[in-house]
Amino acid sequence: MKEFEFYHDVNGNVVALLAEGKAPLGMTKIEPKAADVGQEKHIPVVKHEGGVLKTICGEVPHPMTPEHHISWFAVASEDKISFVYIPTDGPAEACFPEVEHGVAYSYCNLHGLWKKEF
Ligand SMILES: [Fe+2]
């Protein structure tokens, strides 16, 4: 399964590396976390619902406030990656075209990048 690489700069900007190559200059690779710790849940829950793939963050609803929120979800499969940006007043969920297998990502403005293979 293809996994995309994400990087951030000193200003907190996040980019996805869309082609094979070296890390962008001056940027730090973000290692997505694959296991939740503590009470807050960030790992995207993936549901296949009638031809739509739905991502929800997470098992316990994530806070959605201007100060602390899920900024976006992404779903990567063999040949594509799709992003859905989430308004800060939520809810922390998104719908994507159905794919059988892939990697779902969620990005919390405070707690970073999370992933779930499905
Ligand atoms: Fe968070």
Image (tube, rainbow, N blue to C red):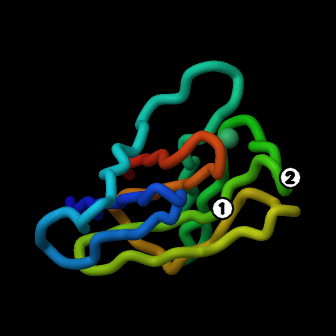
**Residue 76 picture location, percent across and down:** 36, 68
Find residue 37 and report its image quarter: top right
The answer to whether 87 appears left or right of 47 in the picture is right
- Quarter of the view holding residue 22: bottom left
Q: Quadrant of the N terminus?
A: bottom left
Q: Amino acid at mark 1?
A: Ser
Q: Is residue 17 left or right of residue 98?
A: left
Check the image and name the residue furthest to the left.
21
Upstream in sequence: badge 1 or badge 2: 2
Q: Secondary structure at mark 2?
A: loop
Mark 2 lies on residue? 65
Residue at 43 percent across and 47 percent down: it is 116
Q: Residue 67 at what x, y percent from top left?
A: 81, 49
- Residue 115 screen position, x and y as percent: 44, 48
Residue occupying the point 28% across, 71% down? 17
Ligand 1's image quarter is top right
Above or below, 46 against 97 in this view is above
